[in-house]
Image (cartoon, rainbow, N blue to C red):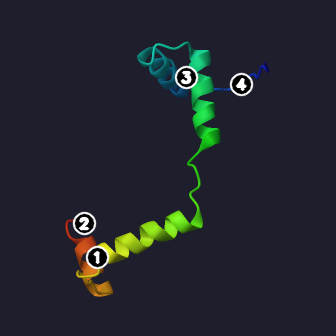
Amino acid sequence: MRTITVKNIPDDLYERLKRSAAENRRSINSQVIVCIEQAVQGRKRESVEVFLGRAREMRRKTLGHPCTDEEFSRMKAVGRP
């Protein structure tokens, strides 16, 4: 297995990492490995067919509820300062 050294970790980041490790009953080293794995894995890419299928399903569900750009903008602005 390889070893890496991380330098200049901000104190607040280290404290959050330490707290997260304790909450998950891990060492800080193990917590860092989990964080790196999650960051490197990222979201799994879905196929174009799956993406288009989800888009078509959403379009089908909203077909009976048309909304103009003006209505959309007005609804978006409700409650905003």
Q: Looking at the rendering, which quadrant does residue 57 occupy?
A: bottom left
Q: From what the image shows, is residue 26 above or below residue 54?
A: above
Q: Of callouts 4 and 2, which one flags the residue occurring earlier in the amino acid sequence?
A: 4
Q: From what the image shows, is residue 50 above or below residue 34?
A: below
The amino acid on which the numbered mark 3 sits, given as a three-letter code, is Tyr
How far from the left and from the top, in percent, is residue 61? 29, 73
Kindly identify the residue that appears in the image at 56 percent across and 57 percent down.
Answer: 46
* In the image: residue 71, left or right of residue 34: left
Q: Under tag 1, what secondary structure?
A: helix
Q: Nearer the viewer, residue 5 or 81?
A: 5
Q: Under tag 2, what secondary structure?
A: loop
Residues at marks 4 and 2 touching, judged by CB atoms closer than 8 Å: no
Label 4 Cα crowd, 10 Å radius (few <14 / some 14-19 / many 20+):
few
Q: Looking at the rendering, which quadrant does residue 19 occupy?
A: top left
What whole-number distance in Å separates the C-alpha atoms at marks 2 and 1?
25 Å
What whole-number distance in Å separates the C-alpha atoms at marks 4 and 2?
42 Å
Q: Of callouts 3 and 4, which one flags the residue occurring earlier in the amino acid sequence?
A: 4
For label 1, the residue is: 62
For label 3, the residue is: 14
The amino acid on which the numbered mark 2 sits, given as a three-letter code, is Arg
For label 4, the residue is: 7
